[in-house]
């Protein structure tokens, strides 16, 4: 396979044939995105758009990038996490599909940000983010690009939190569609995707038996709900730690134990953070966690576990952490008090560091939302959007759900004219 002469930085172009097969396998489970791709190929709604995407470079993302290109977009892709890239997929996108990719699994921080800037170097008219790093770069040292940018999309909760903060300060320089807040994204991707893939990543890394384990889940948003659901299904005893009283109450009524993390720390066998916040497991908790416990993160950034504190707690007289790799993606920290704690995936997204991320069938929904959001931004509706964080129009959300049901051979009812009139009236009552 001869690669086209396009700018890129991937691990090894010779991996492309395997990446093509992996991408085609994922496409089998992505019928909604396939239908959208056919529409895009006919209508070319993204013609003339330059799209910079900072996403996890996986086989599912490859299908999104191919769809965006089919719609006429000039796409450049970089990784949104240093450990999530599938190198064969990155190679396939370059060599087979002619899409510039800047991503290498395990890249260091300097390379990560160099790749991010290379994705921006073609002066995008749209950004597509998973974590808001592209937007942060544009608002930081690449403000010269703003004049060309119509808008952007954001894939994940953490990124939406960052962008809403920027908007509330009046500093957001172009409109963003919060794809994460679409029902067909967070109700399915965050819950069922994160739930299954988090347990998959931890299982692959450790080969643990979940049945009978006490699993402490820090955070009960949609991702936390999904992880708790799957852990209970595997026979684990689930403890939830929350700061939001409504979510804490919900976790309790869903059948979980609820308590402060300081109380859960001594009894947990496996700890999983899904909060989107810094140091959800802090030093005070690490000092209480029992010997032999496993600690993992499934939030977007590697800040949810206080890794600097863990390193200091294990440092010897030479001030170097007493840590060794005992399995791929498993680091054993030997603490000064004799305990051993096991950190998975360097504290990064364990479902992508040690596994393959969300199943293709659920990413079909999320990436259908992304594709439709890009089309929306490129069209006349995009012209009127203010410099704020916007929700994907509900009718597009419903279109994605309807297409997904149809692809599964499922029909639902349609309300009668009488029922519609009743719901739209105030006069009719008891």
Image (cartoon, rainbow, N blue to C red):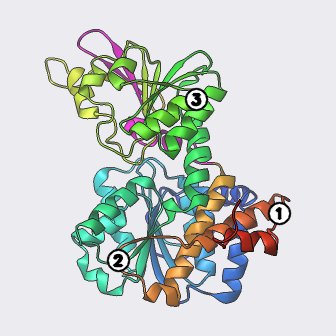
Q: Is residue 391 above or below residue 253?
A: below
Is residue 2 visible in the rendered image? The answer is: no
Nearer the observer, disc 2 or disc 1? 1
Q: Was residue 316 drawn as part of the magenta stretch in this picture?
A: no
For label 1, the residue is: 413
- x, y (%) of residue 237? 56, 20
Circles 2 and 1 in contact, beta carbons < 8 Å: no
- x, y (%) of residue 323? 31, 23
Measured Cα–Cα span from mark 1 to mark 3: 40 Å
Q: Is residue 272 above or below residue 222?
A: above
- SS assignment at label 1: loop
Query: Which of the numbered marks, if any, corresponds to residue 203?
Result: 3
10 Å crowding of disc 1: few (<14), some (14-19), many (20+): few
- x, y (%) of residue 14? 58, 58
Measured Cα–Cα span from mark 2 to mark 1: 49 Å
In the image, the segment drawn in magenta is: 330-358
Q: Was residue 337 drawn as part of the magenta stretch in this picture?
A: yes
- SS assignment at label 3: helix
Q: Where the C terminus falls, by quadrant?
A: bottom right
Q: Is residue 410 above or below residue 369?
A: above
Q: Residue at x 50, y 65 (%)?
A: 179
For label 2, the residue is: 121
Measured Cα–Cα span from mark 2 to mark 3: 39 Å
* The furthest residue to the top: 338
Is residue 263 visible in the rendered image? The answer is: yes
Q: Residue at x 34, y 39 (%)?
A: 304
């Amino acid at each position: 396979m001869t690669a086209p002469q396009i700018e890129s930085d991937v691990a090894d172009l010779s991996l492309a044939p395997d990446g093509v097969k992996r991408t085609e396998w994922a496409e089998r489970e992505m019928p909604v995105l396939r239908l959208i791709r056919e529409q895009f190929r006919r209508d070319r709604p993204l013609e003339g758009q330059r799209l910079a995407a900072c996403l996890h470079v996986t086989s599912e993302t490859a299908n999104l990038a191919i769809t965006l290109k089919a719609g006429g977009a000039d796409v450049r892709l970089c990784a949104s996490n240093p450990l999530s890239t599938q190198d064969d997929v990155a190679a396939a996108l370059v060599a087979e599909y002619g899409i510039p990719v800047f991503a290498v699994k395990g890249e260091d921080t300097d390379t990560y940000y160099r790749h991010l800037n290379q994705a921006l170097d073609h002066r995008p008219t749209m950004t597509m983010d998973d974590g808001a790093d592209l937007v942060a770069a544009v608002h930081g040292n690449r403000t010269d690009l703003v004049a060309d940018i119509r808008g952007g999309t954001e894939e994940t909760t953490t990124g939406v939190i960052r962008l809403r903060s920027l908007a509330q300060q009046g500093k957001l320089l172009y409109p963003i569609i919060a794809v994460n807040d679409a029902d067909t994204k967070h109700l399915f991707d965050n819950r069922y995707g994160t739930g299954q893939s988090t347990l998959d990543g931890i299982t692959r890394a450790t080969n643990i038996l979940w049945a009978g384990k006490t699993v402490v889940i820090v955070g009960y948003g949609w991702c936390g709900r999904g992880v708790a659901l799957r852990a209970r299904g595997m026979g684990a005893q689930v403890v939830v730690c929350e700061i939001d009283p409504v979510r804490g109450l919900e976790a309790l009524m869903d059948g979980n134990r609820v308590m402060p993390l300081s109380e859960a720390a001594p009894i947990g066998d496996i700890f999983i953070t899904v909060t989107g916040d810094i140091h959800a497991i802090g030093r005070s908790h690490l000092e209480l966690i029992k010997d032999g416990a496993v600690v993992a993160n499934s939030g977007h950034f590697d800040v949810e576990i206080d890794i600097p504190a863990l390193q200091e707690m294990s440092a010897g007289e030479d001030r170097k952490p007493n840590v060794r790799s005992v399995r791929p993606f498993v680091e054993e920290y030997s603490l000064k008090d004799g305990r051993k704690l096991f950190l998975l995936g360097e504290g990064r997204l364990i479902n992508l560091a040690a596994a393959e991320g969300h199943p293709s069938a659920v990413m079909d929904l999320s990436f259908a939302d992304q594709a439709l959001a890009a089309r929306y931004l490129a069209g006349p509706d995009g012209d009127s959007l203010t410099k704020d964080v916007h929700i994907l129009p509900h009718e597009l959300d419903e279109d994605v759900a309807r297409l997904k049901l149809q692809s599964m051979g499922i029909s639902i009812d349609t309300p009668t004219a009488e029922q519609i009139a009743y719901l739209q009236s105030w006069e009719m009552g008891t």
